[in-house]
């Protein structure tokens, strides 16, 4: 394969919103898993009011991808439950925030 | 093929109990988990660990592995003796504990035939059923200067791959990627069709590259704004001076106003990360003290002491 020519990608802006479907595909998880994360307050869709009848219309902030992937990995790899993974996620985000300020 | 010493990787003795192995795994997994760890090579270590645990946690695999004998050393060239695995069956392949990327050749040779291990175990048998490939994610570390100018970077990914016998291994895949000007920390670049292959004629998934600036540089970044700690001499800060300042787009002259204190922020407007509304570059002054290492220099400090009668702790009421 000739890959001399550099690949040009598309920059995903931080404000980008994605659908539940896109989020699932991006994280390789099932919709039910994402819905559980929302129910547990680990993930907030960007919608002002959540319509539980039409979850397919929910929109997520692009940063949700990273959060979902982290929670899934922590659960799978460390044997922690959902609340434990969520707690670790929030602490990790706090550490990152503090490190940025250093 | 290189021999892997799974006991050494997990830091347990060869006669460790299953409980001890589990404890060792959990401890090391927390230490080296790529999401949590700040250790260098966390990802590689975590992968090795997952592989070691995959074998040692399963009494059957462990017994088979032990049969190879304890005379082997990690990294030693290894060929499995013929018929070494007679009497063992490794059917129930656990699909847990591993992220993207497969096991080592060593593992695959011993316990291989792991077709469908990576979550694709559900048969997608129907021919007319098109499945889009998985999206893949990777991190790419670039210099801040790459974002100022734009650059081409070649990045190497470890891609899981199945061979014609259904064995899963990894291969290195090098991509030459255009880093667009103005990219910021944490932003993603989507490369359409560069992710996992589709099945049944389905299109390939996308590859997402998350951009991270090399933390070893002089600069700190917050959104589009860039920060630089700039050491100045006490007399430069006190009397004012024009000093050379490096920026990712080249050195500039900066005027330090008289009586500047340490921590003072000087803004170079528009010299942050380029964008329609570019970020700013903040220069944070740090006063560097010249050492009092000769008689003459000590005298200079003595003179200052006499001339200034300065109490730097006045604000602390002492």
Image (tube, rainbow, N blue to C red):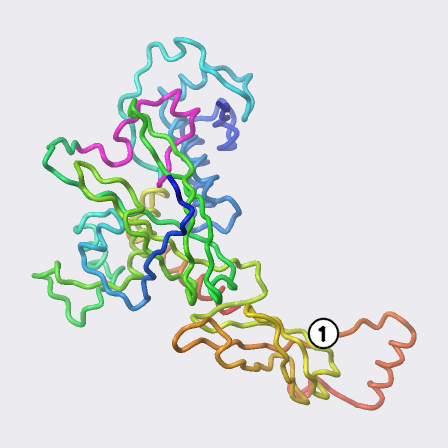
In the foreground, B142 or A89: B142
Q: Is residue B173 above or below residue B70?
A: below
In the foreground, B156 or B313: B156
- Residue at image x 22%, y 61%? A18
Q: Is residue B100 magenta?
A: yes
Dividing the picture into quadrants, the one containing residue B105 is: top left
- Residue at image x 23%, y 47%? A29
Q: Is residue B229 left or right of residue B8?
A: right
Give the letter of the chain under mark 1: B
> Does the rendering let one see residue B299?
yes
10 Å crowding of disc 1: few (<14), some (14-19), many (20+)? few
- Residue at image x 28%, y 42%? B196
Where is residue A32 drawn, in percent x and y? 17, 50
Q: Is residue B188 magenta?
A: no
Dividing the picture into quadrants, the one containing residue B49 is: top left
Where is residue A73 drawn, in percent x and y? 33, 46
Provide the residue designation for mark 1.
B288
Q: Quadrant of the C terminus of chain B?
A: bottom right
Q: Is residue B91 above or below residue B301?
A: above
Q: Is residue A17 left or right of residue B273?
A: left
How many numbered circles does the render carry? 1
Q: Is residue B18 left or right of residue B250?
A: left
- Residue at image x 15%, y 70%? A49
In the foreground, B21 or B53: B53
Magenta region, residue range: B99-122
């Amino acid at each position: 394969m000739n890959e001399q020519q550099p690949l040009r990608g598309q920059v995903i802006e931080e404000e980008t919103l994605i659908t539940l479907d896109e989020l699932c595909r991006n994280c390789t998880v099932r919709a039910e898993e994402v819905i559980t994360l929302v129910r547990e307050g680990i993930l907030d869709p960007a919608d002002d009011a959540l319509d539980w009848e039409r979850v397919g219309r929910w929109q997520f902030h692009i940063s949700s991808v990273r959060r979902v992937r982290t929670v899934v990995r922590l659960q799978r790899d460390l044997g922690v439950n959902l609340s434990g993974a969520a707690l670790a996620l929030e602490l990790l985000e706090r550490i990152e925030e503090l490190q940025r300020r250093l | 093929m290189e021999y892997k010493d799974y006991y050494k990787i997990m830091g347990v003795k060869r006669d460790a109990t299953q409980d001890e192995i589990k404890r060792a795994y959990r401890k090391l997994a927390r230490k080296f988990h790529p999401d949590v760890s700040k250790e260098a090579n966390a990802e590689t270590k975590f992968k090795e660990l997952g592989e070691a645990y995959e074998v040692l946690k399963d009494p059957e695999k462990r017994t088979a592995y032990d049969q190879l004998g304890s005379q082997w050393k990690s990294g030693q060239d290894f060929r499995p003796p013929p018929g070494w695995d007679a009497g063992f069956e490794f059917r129930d392949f656990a699909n847990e504990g591993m992220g993207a990327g497969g096991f080592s050749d060593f593992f695959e040779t011993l316990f291989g035939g792991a077709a469908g291990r990576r979550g694709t175990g559900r048969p997608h048998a129907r021919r007319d059923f098109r499945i889009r490939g998985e999206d893949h994610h990777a991190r790419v570390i670039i210099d801040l200067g790459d974002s100022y100018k734009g650059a081409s970077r070649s990045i190497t990914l470890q891609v899981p791959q199945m061979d014609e016998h259904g064995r899963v291994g990894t291969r290195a895949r090098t991509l030459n990627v255009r880093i667009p000007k103005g990219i910021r920390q944490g932003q993603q670049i989507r490369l359409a069709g560069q992710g996992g292959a589709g099945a049944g004629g389905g299109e390939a998934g996308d590859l997402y590259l998350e951009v991270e600036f090399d933390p070893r540089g002089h600069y700190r970044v917050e959104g589009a704004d860039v920060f630089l700690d700039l050491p100045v001499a006490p007399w430069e800060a006190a009397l004012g001076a024009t000093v050379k300042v490096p920026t990712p787009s080249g050195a500039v002259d900066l005027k330090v106003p008289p009586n500047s204190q340490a921590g003072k922020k000087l803004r170079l407007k528009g010299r942050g990360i380029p964008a329609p509304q570019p970020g700013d570059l903040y220069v944070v002054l740090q006063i560097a003290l010249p050492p009092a290492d000769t008689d003459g220099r000590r005298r200079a400090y003595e003179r200052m002491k006499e001339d200034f009668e300065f109490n730097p702790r006045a604000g602390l009421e002492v």
